[in-house]
Image: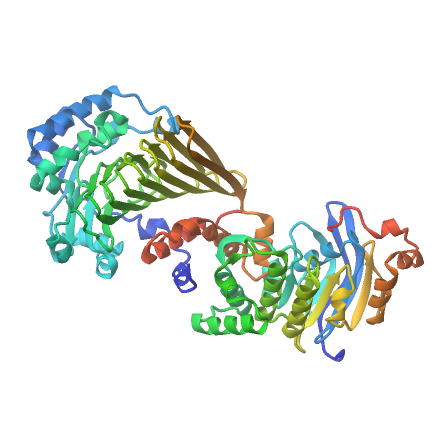
C-alpha cells in the first residue's frame, strides 16, 4: 500500500441523472497513485452508470466535481479525459468491424501521446505488450472485438490499459463472465498494467477477482451512494454474508439497494 | 489494411474543389454547339473517318434514344432534371493522341500531372490511357505486352485498326436499345478503351484509363469493349473526376466485357465525379464456360449515379462477382447495385454492396438475380450493408429475385446500421475525437471493399472517404 502517493483521481458530491431521474446521489471518492480500490455493490445499484458518467458518456447529466491529477475534467468530452490519462475498461467492449486491433491500438496510443507513434516503435511496443500479457499475436490483425469471446474481449481491454499507461483506470465489471482461469489471467494483467503511478478503481459485483488483485480500499455502493468503506476484509465479509445486511444497517430495504433505471 | 498504408490518411482540410474541382481554360480544337442532332452525329462520325456501318448505327441509335422513355426505375425525379439540350456532346481538345507524355498539350499535361496519372503509370501500371473531354490524349502500353499481342488502345483507334473485331463484338453485350442511355451513348460515343487479350496471356499488372471532364455542361460518352480470349486474364482500372461547376454535366458510358472460356476479367472503378455530374452508366459482361468476371465498383461523388454492373453467366461453372461501395453525401443520390443472370448450370455468383449515406444523402441498392430454367446447381449470395450517418441520411434496398429452378442455393442478407453512439463512445474513451472515431468506423465498414484494391487505390480511396467525412454531423 502506497497511500502516500498524490491523488490521481477524485470526485466530490457527484450526482448523475438520466433525464430527471437521479441515479448517483452524491459520491465522494479519492484514489491515490499506486492504490487499488474496489467499488462493490449489488446489481442495479448504479455502479456502471457511475463508471460511464465518470468517463463522460453523453447519455448522462452530471453534477459535482471530477478531478484527474488535480485538474477539473467534468466539462471535458470523453476523448479529452482519455488523453489526460483516464481509462475505462468496458463491461461490454464494443465491436468495430473492419478495423484491425493493430490500427486501433496505434490510433489510441497516438492520441494518448498527442503525437503519431512511428510505425516501428509502435510495433515494438505492441509486441512487447502482447508478450507480457500472453495475448495471441493473431489478435493484432483481427477486427476490433468482432467475433471475440467474452474472455478475449476482456484480455484486450487489459492489453489496451497496459499500452495506454493510464494514470487512473476505471474497470467496469472486468471480471464478469470469466471462468476462473480467465479471471486469473485478467487480474494478473491488471496488476502488470498498474504501476506505482497508476490508480485503479475496480467496479464489481463479486469479491472473487479481489483474491488475485488485492484492493487497498473497498467501497460499498448502494442506492446511488457509497454506504460503507473499509479495508480488504470488507470484501470478504460481503462474499460471506451478501449485501442485504449492509442494506439493513444503513436503513435501506434490501430491494431498494438497487436504483430503478440504473445500468446492470 | 495494415498500419503502414493508413498513414496515407494524412492531409485533412483539402477538398474536392481544390484537388479535382479546378478547370483549365477552354482551348479546344473543336467544341460542338449544345444539343444533339443527326447533323452532329454525322459530323462526329465523319471527323473520326468511320466505316459506314458505324455511322449507320449512330443514326439509328439517335432515333432510338429520342423514342425511348426515361427509365422508370431509379430516381425519376432527379433524372427529369437532365436538360439534354444544354449539353455539349462532343469536344475535341487540341493536339493529336500521343504515346509520348511530352507531346501532350501543356495545359492538359498539367491537369493529369496534378491528378497523378503518369506517376501512377511509372509505379504500378502496365498501360494507361487518359481521356480529356471526348478524346484520348495520351496512351501507352508496356512493350512486352504489345509483343504478346495484347491490344490496349482507345476505342476510336480500335475501330480504325481492328474493324473486324470491333464489328463482331460492339453492341453484342449491350444492344443499342437496351435503355435510353445506352442508345445515347451509341449515337454520341467517343473515346473509351478497346482491349483484346489473346488466348492464354495473363496480364499481370493492371491497365488503367483515366477520364476527365473539363468543360461546363459537357457530355462524356466513352465506350469500352474488353475481350479476354480463352484462358487469359486482365485487370482494368478506371478513374474519373471533373471540375465543380454550378450547372450539370452528363457522363454516360457503355462498357462491354467478354470473358471467353476459362478467362478472367476484373474491372475496377473509382469514380469521384464532382457533384454536378449525372453519372448514368451501363456495364455488362458475358462470362463463358469456367470464366470469372468481377466488377469492383467504387462510387463517390456525382449528383445522381445510376449504375448496375451486370454479368450474364452464359457458360457452365462461370463465376461472377460484384463488389461495390457507394458514398452519398449532401444532395447526392447513389442508385447502384448489380445484376446477375445465371443462364447456365452450376454457375456461381456473389454480390456485396456497401453504402454510406451522410447528411441528406441517399443511397439505394437495386439488384436483380435471375436463375433461368435449366440452370441447375447454381449458387448465389447477395449481401447489402448500409451505414447511415446522421438523422436525415437515407438508404433503401430494392432486391429482385427471379428464380426459375429449384435445385439452386440463394442467399440474401440486408443490414442497415447507424454509426452507433456506443461505438463512438468506445473509441472516444481511447482518445479518438468524434471525427476520427467516425472516420475509423466508416473505414472499417468499407474495409472488405478496400482490401480488393491495389494498394495505391486503397490509400486514395481512404483519403477520399476522409474528405467526404469532414465536418460531418453525428
Question: Going 24% across and 61% down the picture, which residue do you hit?
Answer: B123
Q: Position of residue B264 (x, y in %)?
A: 26, 46
The answer to whether A117 appears left or right of B72 in the picture is right
Instruction: Specify the color scheme.
Output: rainbow
Q: Position of residue B307 (x, y in %)?
A: 34, 36
Q: Position of residue B180 (x, y in %)?
A: 27, 26
The answer to whether B463 appears left or right of A229 in the picture is left
Question: Going 61% across and 64% down the picture, which residue do you hit?
Answer: A155
The answer to whether A166 appears left or right of B267 in the picture is right
The answer to whether B108 appears left or right of A237 in the picture is left
Report the number of discs: 0
Looking at the rendering, in which quadrant would you find the N terminus of chain A? bottom right
Q: Position of residue B159 (x, y in %)?
A: 11, 38
Q: Nearer the viewer, residue B70 or B407?
A: B407
Q: Nearer the viewer, residue B282 or B222?
A: B282
Q: Nearer the viewer, residue B116 or B443?
A: B443
Q: Quadrant of residue A220?
A: bottom right
Q: Is residue B168 visible?
A: yes
Q: Is residue A111 above or below residue B118?
A: below
Q: Quadrant of residue A180?
A: bottom right
Q: Nearer the viewer, residue B174 or A201?
A: B174
Q: Is residue B333 visible?
A: no
Amino acid at each position: 500500500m502506497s497511500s502516500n502517493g498524490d491523488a490521481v483521481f477524485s470526485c466530490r458530491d457527484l450526482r448523475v441523472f438520466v433525464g430527471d431521474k437521479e441515479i448517483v446521489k452524491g459520491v465522494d471518492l479519492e484514489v491515490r497513485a499506486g492504490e487499488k480500490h474496489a467499488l462493490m455493490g449489488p446489481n442495479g445499484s448504479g455502479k456502471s452508470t457511475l463508471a460511464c458518467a465518470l468517463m463522460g458518456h453523453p447519455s448522462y447529466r452530471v453534477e459535482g466535481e471530477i478531478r484527474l491529477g488535480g485538474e477539473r475534467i467534468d466539462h471535458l468530452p470523453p476523448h479529452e479525459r482519455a488523453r489526460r490519462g483516464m481509462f475505462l475498461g468496458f463491461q461490454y467492449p464494443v465491436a468495430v468491424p473492419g478495423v484491425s486491433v493493430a490500427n486501433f491500438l496505434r490510433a489510441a496510443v497516438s492520441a494518448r501521446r498527442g503525437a503519431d507513434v512511428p510505425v516501428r516503435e509502435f510495433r515494438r511496443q505492441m509486441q512487447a505488450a502482447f508478450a507480457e500479457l500472453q495475448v495471441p499475436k493473431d489478435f493484432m490483425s483481427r477486427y476490433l472485438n468482432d467475433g471475440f469471446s467474452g474472455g478475449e474481449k476482456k484480455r484486450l481491454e487489459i492489453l489496451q490499459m497496459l499500452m495506454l499507461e493510464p494514470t487512473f483506470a476505471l474497470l467496469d465489471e472486468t471480471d464478469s463472465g470469466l471462468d476462473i482461469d480467465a479471471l486469473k489471467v485478467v487480474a494478473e494483467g491488471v496488476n502488470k498494467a498498474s504501476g506505482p503511478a497508476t490508480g485503479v478503481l475496480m467496479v464489481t459485483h463479486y469479491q472473487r477477482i479481489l483474491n488475485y488483485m488485492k484492493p487497498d480500499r473497498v467501497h460499498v455502493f448502494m442506492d446511488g451512494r457509497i454506504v460503507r468503506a473499509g479495508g480488504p476484509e470488507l470484501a470478504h465479509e460481503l462474499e460471506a454474508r451478501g449485501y442485504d445486511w449492509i442494506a439493513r444497517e444503513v436503513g435501506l430495504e434490501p430491494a431498494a439497494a438497487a436504483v430503478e433505471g440504473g445500468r446492470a | 489494411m495494415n498500419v503502414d498504408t493508413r498513414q496515407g490518411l494524412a492531409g485533412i482540410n483539402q477538398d474536392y474543389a481544390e484537388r479535382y474541382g479546378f478547370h483549365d481554360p477552354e482551348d479546344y480544337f473543336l467544341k460542338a454547339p449544345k444539343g444533339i442532332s443527326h447533323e452532329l452525329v454525322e459530323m462526329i462520325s465523319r471527323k473520326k473517318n468511320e466505316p459506314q456501318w458505324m455511322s449507320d448505327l449512330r443514326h439509328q441509335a439517335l432515333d432510338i434514344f429520342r423514342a425511348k422513355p426515361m427509365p422508370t426505375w431509379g430516381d425519376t425525379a432527379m433524372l427529369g432534371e437532365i436538360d439534354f439540350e444544354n449539353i455539349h456532346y462532343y469536344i475535341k481538345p487540341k493536339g493529336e493522341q500521343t504515346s509520348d507524355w511530352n507531346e501532350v498539350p501543356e495545359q492538359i499535361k498539367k491537369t493529369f500531372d496534378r491528378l497523378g496519372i503518369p506517376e501512377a503509370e511509372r509505379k504500378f501500371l502496365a498501360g494507361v490511357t487518359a481521356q480529356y473531354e471526348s478524346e484520348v490524349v495520351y496512351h501507352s502500353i508496356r512493350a512486352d505486352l504489345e509483343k504478346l499481342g495484347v491490344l490496349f488502345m482507345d476505342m476510336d483507334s480500335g475501330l480504325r485498326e481492328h474493324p473486324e473485331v470491333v464489328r463482331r463484338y460492339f453492341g453484342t453485350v449491350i444492344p443499342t436499345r437496351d435503355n435510353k442511355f445506352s442508345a445515347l451513348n451509341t449515337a454520341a460515343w467517343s473515346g473509351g478503351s478497346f482491349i483484346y487479350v489473346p488466348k492464354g496471356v495473363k496480364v499481370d499488372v493492371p491497365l488503367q484509363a483515366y477520364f476527365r471532364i473539363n468543360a461546363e455542361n459537357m457530355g462524356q460518352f466513352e465506350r469500352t469493349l474488353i475481350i479476354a480470349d480463352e484462358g487469359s486474364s486482365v485487370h482494368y482500372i478506371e478513374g474519373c473526376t471533373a471540375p465543380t461547376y454550378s450547372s450539370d454535366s452528363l457522363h454516360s458510358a457503355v462498357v462491354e466485357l467478354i470473358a471467353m472460356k476459362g478467362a478472367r476479367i476484373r474491372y475496377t472503378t473509382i469514380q469521384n465525379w464532382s457533384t454536378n455530374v449525372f453519372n448514368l452508366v451501363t456495364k455488362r459482361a458475358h462470362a463463358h464456360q469456367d470464366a470469372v468476371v468481377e466488377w469492383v465498383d467504387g462510387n463517390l461523388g456525382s449528383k445522381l449515379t445510376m449504375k448496375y454492373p451486370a454479368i450474364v453467366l452464359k457458360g457452365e461453372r462461370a463465376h461472377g462477382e460484384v463488389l461495390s461501395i457507394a458514398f452519398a453525401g449532401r444532395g447526392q443520390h447513389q442508385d447502384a447495385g448489380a445484376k446477375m443472370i445465371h443462364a447456365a448450370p452450376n454457375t456461381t455468383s456473389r454480390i456485396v454492396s456497401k453504402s454510406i449515406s451522410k447528411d441528406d444523402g441517399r443511397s439505394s441498392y437495386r439488384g436483380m438475380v435471375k436463375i433461368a430454367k435449366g440452370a441447375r446447381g447454381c449458387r448465389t449470395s447477395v449481401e447489402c450493408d448500409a451505414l447511415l450517418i446522421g438523422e436525415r441520411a437515407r438508404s433503401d434496398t430494392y432486391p429482385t429475385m427471379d428464380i426459375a429452378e429449384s435445385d439452386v442455393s440463394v442467399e440474401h442478407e440486408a443490414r442497415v446500421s447507424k454509426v452507433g453512439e456506443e461505438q463512438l463512445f468506445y473509441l472516444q474513451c481511447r482518445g479518438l475525437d468524434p471525427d476520427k472515431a467516425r472516420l475509423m468506423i466508416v473505414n472499417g465498414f468499407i474495409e472488405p471493399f478496400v482490401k480488393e484494391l491495389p494498394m495505391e487505390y486503397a490509400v486514395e480511396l481512404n483519403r477520399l472517404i476522409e474528405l467526404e467525412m469532414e465536418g460531418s454531423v453525428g
